[in-house]
Every structure is written in C-alpha cells, then in structure tokens.
C-alpha cells in the first residue's frame, strides 16, 4: 500500500458515521511438524481462532490423527490445561478407527474459566516390543534377543518416579524375562501380562513426545448446559376484568410472583420473562396481530419503548424496579434463576428514535423502515441499523444489559440475534463473559445452519434448535446424533416443543398425546429444555393459516384456569420429567447419545450414558428412552439394543442382561438385547428407563 493510499484510508476512517477499516487477515505462522505428527485435532474452531465449548463437570472428547513413519507403535495423550496454565489432567487416547490412526480420549474440566487442551503424540517402545516379541517368539526367531530387549524396556520404565506397587510389578516382570531357566513363552507372558499393561497404561513410557498446539477451551457453569426453563408473560398472571367497568386490568410483577411456587413445584429452575418494558402506542398491534387496536389492547411487548422509557425501564402497569427485585428474590428463594427477553428493536415511540435517528434505516420517502419478514410485517417495530453508529448502539445495549444484571438477571433469551451483526455479538458476549461469566445468553435463532453454528461459536451459550420441526423417527434420531457429535463444541441445544411464536401442525392436531410425546422428547433429548406457559393446559388452537396460537398472548392478556391442569396430566408429566432429569446425570449431558434401531417406524429408542469415571456421583448412569411418536395410535415392535453402547456385555440373544425401571411409572422389566415394547399415546406414550446390569 502506498503512502497516499494509507493517508486516504486514515481520512476515510475518521469521517463520522464511517466504520473503521477491517484489519487485513494474516496467515497463521509457520510451525514445523512434530517428530510424531499430530494433525486434525478436535474440538478446534477455525484453527483455534475461537474457543471450543465445554461445561464444568461434563466430559468432552478430544480427537486427533497421530501416526509416524515405519512400523513402530505410536500412542497419544490428551492433556487438559487449567486457566492458570498448569496441566490439570491427562488421559491416554485410544485408537477408535484402526487403520486410520484416529485417536480419542475424554477430559473433564471441573470449574468455569479459560482452559486449553493439547494432544501429545509419542512413540510407544513397550507397545512396539510386545507386538514384535509375540511374532518372533512364536516363530522361534531371535527369541533370546527379543526377551532381553523387553527386559531393557521395562527396566527403563521402572527407573522413574512411580508408586512402589507399580515399580514392583515392572521389576518382577524384568526378573521373569531374564530368567533363562523358564520357558520362553512363560517369560514373554510375564513381560506382556495384564498387570504390566495396566501399570504402563497409568504410567506410560513415552519416547519422542511431540505436542500439538494448545487449543482454547471456554468452560461455562453447569446451567449453561443443563436447565429447565419456563416462559411466562408477567402481565397475564393476575390479569382480570374490572367487575365495575368490564375493562382489562393488567397483571403485575407482584401477581406474577404468585405463580412462581407452582412453577418451581414442577421442577423448573429458570423462569423466563418476555419483555417487561414500556410499549409504544404508534401502530400498536391489536388481537391476533392486527393493526386495529383498541385502548384495551396492551400491544405486543416486543414493540418496546414509549415516553415512559425504553429497554432499561419497566412498563408502568407491571410495577417498579422494587417489584422486579422482589420477583427475582422470590424466584431465588424457590431455587430458580430469572431470564429476561432481549429484543433489540424499538417502537416508533422509543426514546432512541428521537435521540438517535441515525440508529435506524430511513427510506427514500423519509419514513423509517419497520421490521418485515415477508409475508410477516411488524409495523410496530423499527429494527436497528448498525452501520451508522455501531459504537453508540454497542454502548447503549451494553448499559441496558448491565442494568438488568445489576437487578439479578442471570440469563438472557436474545430475540432474533441472527438479524444483528456477528461482530457486535462477539464483542458484547466477550465483554459480559469477562465481567459477568455467570450470565448465560440463549440465541433464539431459527435460521440457516451456518448462522446458528457461528452464533454459538462466537459466544452464545445456548441455542434454540430445529427440534420443534423434527417429528419423524429418522429426523429426530439423526438430529440427536448431530447435536451430540458434530456441533457439540459450538452449539448447546435448547429444546422447546412450542413457543409463543410457534405452534406446529403436529402440536395443533395431536391433542394431549402430542404434548406428552414432545415433552418427553424435549426433556430427555437435550440437557436444556423449556416450555411456554399454558403447555400444561394443552393450548393447541392455531390462528387460521398460521403456525401460532389463535388469540396469541403477544397481543392480549390471557387468563388461565390453572385448576384444569390436573385433569389433563401434562403438569404431572412435566414434574416427573424434571425429577428424572435431576436424578440422572446421563440426562444432564449432551455428548454420549446412541440411537437404537426399532422394527416400528413410529417408535424411537435412544440411550444416554455417563461412565462412572465421568459421573458426579461416581457411579455409572445409563438411561434408555423409548417413545411412541404417533399421537393417534398404539404402536409396538422390537428394539434392537446396542449393548456395547450401554456398557453391557452380550451373553446371548435371549439372555436377560439388564434390569430396567420405568422412571415414569415405576415398573421393572428384565430385558435382553431385543426387547418387545408396546406404547399407548393416550396412556403411557414412553418408557424412560434407568438401567442396572445383571
């Protein structure tokens, strides 16, 4: 670049409203290959540009391709690096794809923070000797030489800092290998015994150690992975018609707090509030998203902003910050956190519109463009334009979020983050991660896969998913596998059967059975799941021609008779599912999922398993879920269980190998590898089974 070009670029960057020039990308620095090559390491995002995701207490897989020239044995170690830079723990990697040199091990970080990991490839002299010695001794070739070389290898292994019992095992093997009075096969067996292999698995003898780069890993608190969310519109809780005037009276934060004990009793640990801010009057939406509103219509809470304030204010009908603080305090007393909706848009009456018109898009006719997602139109909302004053918008949004964090909010559900610049989110989430690492951000981004994955990669802790629209056996099974094994380092899923915006045809048509089926799938298929208030009442009537509820709560108050929930059984199911989730670490984890074949095309079976060494209880935990996906008819068939995936051995086709207890009903069964199941969607739509090996 010439000096003139540099001056022109500097002048352009100083012009008000111009974005700063983007730095030119630089190639990664050259690094020599190791003596034992270590390549194709995962989980690594963009060559380490962004950290992979992990959660305190959850094991995550480290994989790498490790090989060398010639025929000597190679091995690999995965090393977890703590935030202070010290090696925290390590695990011997196993070859998971023989012939392809692909190795894997699982590591467990035990606290939030900025961690790292690396893979160390190394030459395995003991493994090389065992392989060669067995071939040659069996063939009678160089027998004494091979046994002597084995003794030398084990002498090297014993001449290190080792526990006394481990050193004894190795020295005993050396004596046996050098004992020429014993048969050669006996000497070989002593040197290649299971005891020796166990010692060297725990204390490997490593030559030519070749480390990979140390890759970044961000570890979040457990709630970032595991939680049960309950969505509510505070204004509906306690809303009623004035007996004298017949006009609607809004519920308040105080009346909404009266609902919290019932939510907590169902086992939910996060209560999520839709926007609680002042609502604009201009183009205020009426019932069912019409533009013909009345004075009684409260308007959409997403049309944020009025003369009463904007995103950092509370709607006067709902109360004050003292009322909000009381709501948060009550939720905490009941063991719940409070999440708040973040919708970065403004009604025409928002203070931002007059104070910062440059934050919005002005059309050719001088009007400000309202939000559209054809064919949907949102005339009561102006979207933000981040091109003119990105720094001003950033500071304003940051300060808004800080206000709510100061008042006890520990999670934000972010509305449509995919319609805002990703560099804005990366900066904002990075700052909050540094200042408030406990705060969780959930991305409501039902959009293209690349955008969803990248939002997760740059900092969103959780993401809504396509689960809502996956209804067939193949779709659901494939999606569970994808989330557990392909996108797990980027995206933590949050499964929602419905939302205030979404009521799928399956939910509209399937009745109570559909609500039960989808609750089971959401609660067991994902560590984080949520429901929208009214799910207990099977609210499934759609607005004609739309995949959302008629008389939508976004546009009106909704009085609910919660006493009816008991007769439908959904509230009791939700309570049971959340109890089962709390009791079983396997359901609190994302990555170890296995889909098992079934003979019926509407019967889905999958399992989740946590081995003892990775379980918070110190005990192995395995759960098998079998669900009838058909909300209309009883289905039956045979499940073909993969016993290895369940951590079980296969003694024979018809031999019971496990005792399974249905956590939903308490029944106990004795299953072999091919059990028969029959599920009635109007009675028991699913088995959620804990497993005990026989």
Image (cartoon, rainbow, N blue to C red):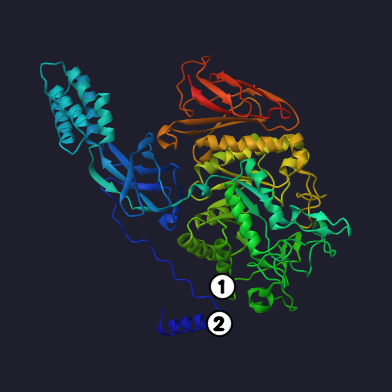
The quadrant in which residue 506 appears is top right
Structural crowding at the residue carrying mark 2, measured as other residues with C-alpha within 10 Å and reported as few (<14), some (14–19) or many (≥20) = few
Q: Position of residue 464 (x, y in %)?
A: 61, 50
The residue drawn where x is 36% and y is 35% is 95
Residue 655 falls left or right of residue 686: left
Residue 619's place in the image compared with 87, above or below, is: above
Residue 490 falls left or right of residue 96: right
Whether residue 31 can be seen here: yes
The image shows a total of numbered marks equal to 2
Q: Mark 1 sits on what residue?
A: 390
Residue 76 falls left or right of residue 410: left
The quadrant in which residue 681 appears is top right
**Which mark sits nearer the N-terminus, 1 or 2?**
2
The residue drawn where x is 64% and y is 41% is 265
Residue 286's place in the image compared with 351, above or below, is: above
Q: Mark 2 sits on what residue?
A: 16
The quadrant in which residue 442 appears is bottom right
Q: Position of residue 581 (x, y in %)?
A: 56, 37
Structural crowding at the residue carrying mark 1, measured as other residues with C-alpha within 10 Å and reported as few (<14), some (14–19) or many (≥20) = some
């Amino acid at each position: 670049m010439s000096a003139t070009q540099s001056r022109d670029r500097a002048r352009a960057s100083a012009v008000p409203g111009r974005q700063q020039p983007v730095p030119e990308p630089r190639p990664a620095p050259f690094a020599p290959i190791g003596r034992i090559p270590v390549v194709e390491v995962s989980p690594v995002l963009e060559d380490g540009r962004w950290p992979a995701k992990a959660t305190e207490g959850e094991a995550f897989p480290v994989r790498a391709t490790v090989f060398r020239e010639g025929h000597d044995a190679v091995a690999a170690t995965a090393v977890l690096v703590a935030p202070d830079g010290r090696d925290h723990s390590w695990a011997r990697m196993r070859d998971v794809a023989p012939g392809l040199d692909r190795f894997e091990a699982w590591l467990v970080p035990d606290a939030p923070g900025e961690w790292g990991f690396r893979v160390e490839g190394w030459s395995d002299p003991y493994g090389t000797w065992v392989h060669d010695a067995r071939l040659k001794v069996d063939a009678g070739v160089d027998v004494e030489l091979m046994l002597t070389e084995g003794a030398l290898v084990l002498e090297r292994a014993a001449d290190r800092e080792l526990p006394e019992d481990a050193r004894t095992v190795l020295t005993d093997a050396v004596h046996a290998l050098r004992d020429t009075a014993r048969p050669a096969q006996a000497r070989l067996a002593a040197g290649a015994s299971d005891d020796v292999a166990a010692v060297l698995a725990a204390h490997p003898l490593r030559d030519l150690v070749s480390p990979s780069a140390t890759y970044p890993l961000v570890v979040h608190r457990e709630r970032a992975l595991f939680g049960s969310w309950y969505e509510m519109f505070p204004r509906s809780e306690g809303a009623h018609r004035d007996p004298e005037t017949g006009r609607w009276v809004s519920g308040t934060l105080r009346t909404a707090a009266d609902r919290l004990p019932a939510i907590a009793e169902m086992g939910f640990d996060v209560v999520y509030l839709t926007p609680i801010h002042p609502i604009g009057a201009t183009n205020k939406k009426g019932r069912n998203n019409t533009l013909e509103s009345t004075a009684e219509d409260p308007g959409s809470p997403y049309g944020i902003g009025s003369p009463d304030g904007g995103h950092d204010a509370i709607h006067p009908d709902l109360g004050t910050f003292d009322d909000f603080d009381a709501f948060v305090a009550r939720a905490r007393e009941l063991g719940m956190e409070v999440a708040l909706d973040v919708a970065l848009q403004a009604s025409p009456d928002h203070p931002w519109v007059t104070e910062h018109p440059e934050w919005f898009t002005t059309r050719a006719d001088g009007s400000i463009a309202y939000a559209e997602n054809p064919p949907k139109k949102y005339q009561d909302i102006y979207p933000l334009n981040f091109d003119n004053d990105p720094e001003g918008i950033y500071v304003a949004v940051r300060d808004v979020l800080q206000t709510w964090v100061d008042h006890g909010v520990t999670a934000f559900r972010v509305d449509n983050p995919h319609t805002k610049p990703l560099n804005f989110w990366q900066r904002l989430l990075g700052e909050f991660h540094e200042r408030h690492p406990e705060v969780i951000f959930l991305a409501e981004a039902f959009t293209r896969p690349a955008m969803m994955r990248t939002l997760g990669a740059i900092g969103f802790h959780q993401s809504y998913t396509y689960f809502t629209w996956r209804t067939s056996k193949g779709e659901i099974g494939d999606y569970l596998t994808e989330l557990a094994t392909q996108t797990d380092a980027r995206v933590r899923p949050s499964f929602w059967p419905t939302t205030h915006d979404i009521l799928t045809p399956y939910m509209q048509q399937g009745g109570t059975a559909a609500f039960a089926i989808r609750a089971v799938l959401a609660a067991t298929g994902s560590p984080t799941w949520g429901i929208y208030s009214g799910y207990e009442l099977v609210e499934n009537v759609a607005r004609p021609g739309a995949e959302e509820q008629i008389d939508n709560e976004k546009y009106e108050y909704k009085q609910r008779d919660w006493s009816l929930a008991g007769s439908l059984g959904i509230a009791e199911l939700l309570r049971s599912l959340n109890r089962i989730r709390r009791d079983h670490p396997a359901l609190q984890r994302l990555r170890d999922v296995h889909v098992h074949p079934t003979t019926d095309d509407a019967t889905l079976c999958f399992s989740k398993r946590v081995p003892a060494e990775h379980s918070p209880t110190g005990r192995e935990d395995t759960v098998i879920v079998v669900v009838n996906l058909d909300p209309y008819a009883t289905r039956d068939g045979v499940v073909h269980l993969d016993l290895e995936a369940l951590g079980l051995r296969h003694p024979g086709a018809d031999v019971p190998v496990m005792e399974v207890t249905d956590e939903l009903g308490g029944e106990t069964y004795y299953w072999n590898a091919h059990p028969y199941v029959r599920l009635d969607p109007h009675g028991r739509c699913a088995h959620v089974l804990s497993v005990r090996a026989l």
